[in-house]
């Protein structure tokens, strides 16, 4: 009787633990939405009446939407200013430093301040204007400064990009060598040295993905 009632009272949520209990409710709701989406995905998979890449893209969007709902929490400006204390202090100590990662392309770095975290950069241009080559050069520059780089490419294979890196590092012209039909011993050594050097770079090149789902999963 009395002992049981005392236990019930002790187990009741209190204002002190309100935030903790609210987090549990929020998490359980997210799990229920995930189970609902999972059921829909299983239904489409069993039906098998839609092209597989289209189904994968749809499934990934549904799952990512769940994550977006869970993380889309408004932030008060006092919290934002608190988070800015460190980066602003660092900037005041060295206002001339680039805020982002250096690509090694000095004019570009000076223009945009390097590649900054949290920013999305869109590189646009007509066909065969060198977009892939520019991105490849940026990847090379970033990697040589110790930054891990992942490149998702649809226009250039890993081998083609590798060849371009080798030519640039070894300072050779494949077309000229092909034209004369002979490669010198010095050129051979430069090519081999370039390959050894490039092999150490932290660059991952992906050219085999055909769907949005595959791309996001790889990244």
Image (tube, rainbow, N blue to C red):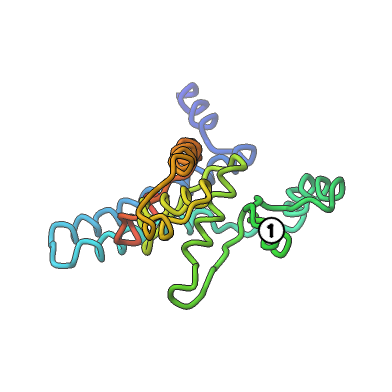
Q: Where is the N terminus found, in terms of image quarters?
A: top left
- Considering depth in this image, is 63 or 151 the residue closer to the camera? 151
Label 1 sits on residue: 109
70 left or right of 205? right
Res 64 quadrant in image: bottom left
Residue 84: percent from left, percent from top: 76, 51
Q: Is residue 40 visible?
A: yes
Q: Residue at x 46, y 56 (%)?
A: 173
Q: Residue at x 17, y 57 (%)?
A: 45
Q: Is residue 29 visible?
A: no
Residue situated furthest right in the rendering: 93
Q: Residues within 10 Å of mark 1 (few under 14, many from 20)?
A: some
- Considering depth in this image, is 127 or 20 the residue closer to the camera? 127
Instruction: Give the vertical position of 147 relative to 137 (above or below).
Output: above
173 left or right of 50? right
Instruction: Give the vertical position of 62 relative to 104 (above or below).
Output: below
Residue 96: percent from left, percent from top: 83, 53
- Considering depth in this image, is 162 or 10 the residue closer to the camera? 162
Residue 34: percent from left, percent from top: 35, 52
- Considering depth in this image, is 86 or 124 the residue closer to the camera? 124
Residue 154: percent from left, percent from top: 36, 62
Q: Residue at x 46, y 48 (%)?
A: 166
Residue situated furthest top in the rendering: 3
Residue situated furthest bottom in the rendering: 126
Judging from the image, what secondary structure is the residue with disc 1 in? Answer: helix
């Amino acid at each position: 009787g009395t002992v049981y009632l005392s236990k019930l009272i002790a187990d009741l949520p209190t204002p002190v633990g309100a935030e903790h209990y609210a987090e549990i409710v929020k998490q359980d709701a997210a799990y229920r939405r995930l189970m609902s989406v999972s059921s829909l995905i299983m239904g489409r998979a069993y039906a098998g009446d839609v092209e597989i890449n289209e189904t994968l893209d749809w499934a990934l969007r549904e799952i990512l939407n769940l994550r977006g709902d869970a993380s889309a929490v408004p932030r008060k400006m006092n919290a934002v200013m608190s988070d800015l204390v460190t980066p602003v202090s660092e900037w005041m100590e060295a206002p001339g430093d680039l805020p982002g990662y250096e690509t090694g392309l000095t004019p570009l770095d000076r223009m945009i301040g390097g590649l900054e975290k949290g920013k999305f950069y869109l590189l646009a241009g007509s066909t065969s204007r060198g977009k892939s080559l520019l991105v490849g050069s940026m990847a090379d520059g970033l990697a040589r400064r110790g930054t891990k780089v992942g490149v998702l490419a649809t226009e250039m294979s890993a081998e083609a990009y590798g060849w371009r890196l080798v030519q640039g590092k070894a300072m050779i012209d494949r077309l000229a060598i092909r034209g004369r039909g002979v490669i010198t011993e010095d050129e051979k050594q430069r090519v081999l040295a370039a390959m050894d050097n490039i092999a150490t770079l932290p660059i991952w090149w992906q050219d085999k993905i055909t769907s949005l789902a595959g791309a996001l999963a790889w990244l």
